[in-house]
Image (cartoon, rainbow, N blue to C red):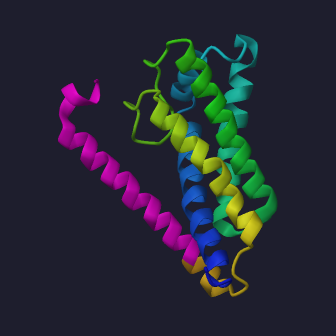
Amino acid sequence: MIAPAILPLAGALLAGGIGMLLLAAGVAKLRDHDGFLTTLSAYRLVPDFLLDSAAWTLAIAETGVGAALLVGVAPLWAGIGAALLFVLFVLAMTINLLRGRADLSCGCLPGMESARLSWSAVARSTLLAPAALLPVLTGLPTSLLLRYQALAAGACLLALILALSHLISAARGPEEQSA
């Protein structure tokens, strides 16, 4: 049985990792608004007259929810917001994969512009949706020091995962990445 004190730490670790993921993705979309607008348009899910508003709204929502998770502000709403964002991503990717449009940019992570839609990206986002709710269910540590250490550890864990992903992509070479 997992000790009850571990659950809030696990929740804070997930909040840190997911918060950093959303914050980094949101800031990247805000910095390259035109690039994100092109990616969003390629999904063919939003009417043209709403594209610009949808792009700004999504980027700001990702940034805000990510920051809230990292800082530990309104963890209930931040966790629910993160879960809803991941559900939205799953739906958008699934619709396009079912349309046979796997050639689209995933738009998932900054620095991974070559990542294409795939069922593994759908699976990853599907797993992240309930993971974003764990901090809501477990609560965060009552000690601010423990809370921020766990949040920072989660952000560091995400950075390590992204670095490993880049190394694996670089080691594969261009032929294997397109397969």
Asked if the stretch drawn in magenta spans residue 144, the answer is: no
Q: Is residue 166 left or right of residue 108?
A: left
Position of 5 relative to 174 (above/below)? below
Q: Position of residue 57 (x, y in %)?
A: 73, 35
Q: Is residue 147 left or right of residue 80?
A: left
Q: Is residue 46 left or right of residue 149?
A: right
**Looking at the image, which residue is at 27% across and 40% down?**
169
Q: Quadrant of residue 45?
A: top right
Q: Position of residue 79 (x, y in %)?
A: 73, 57
Confirm whether residue 68 shows in the render: no
- The number of discs equals 0
Quadrant where the image shows the N terminus: bottom right
Viewer-proximal residue, 159 or 11?
11
Q: Position of residue 106 (x, y in %)?
A: 49, 30
Confirm whether residue 71 shows in the render: yes
Position of 98 relative to 136 (above/below)? above
In the image, which residues are magenta? 150-179
Quadrant where the image shows the C terminus: top left
Position of 148 relative to 129 (above/below)? below
Q: Is residue 51 left or right of residue 107?
A: right
**Looking at the image, which residue is at 29% across and 24% down?**
178
Q: Quadrant of residue 48?
A: top right
Asked if the stretch drawn in magenta spans residue 165, the answer is: yes
Q: Residue furthest front?
A: 1
> What secondary structure is the magenta-colored segment mainly?
helix
**Looking at the image, which residue is at 76% across and 66% down?**
137
Viewer-proximal residue, 69 or 130?
130
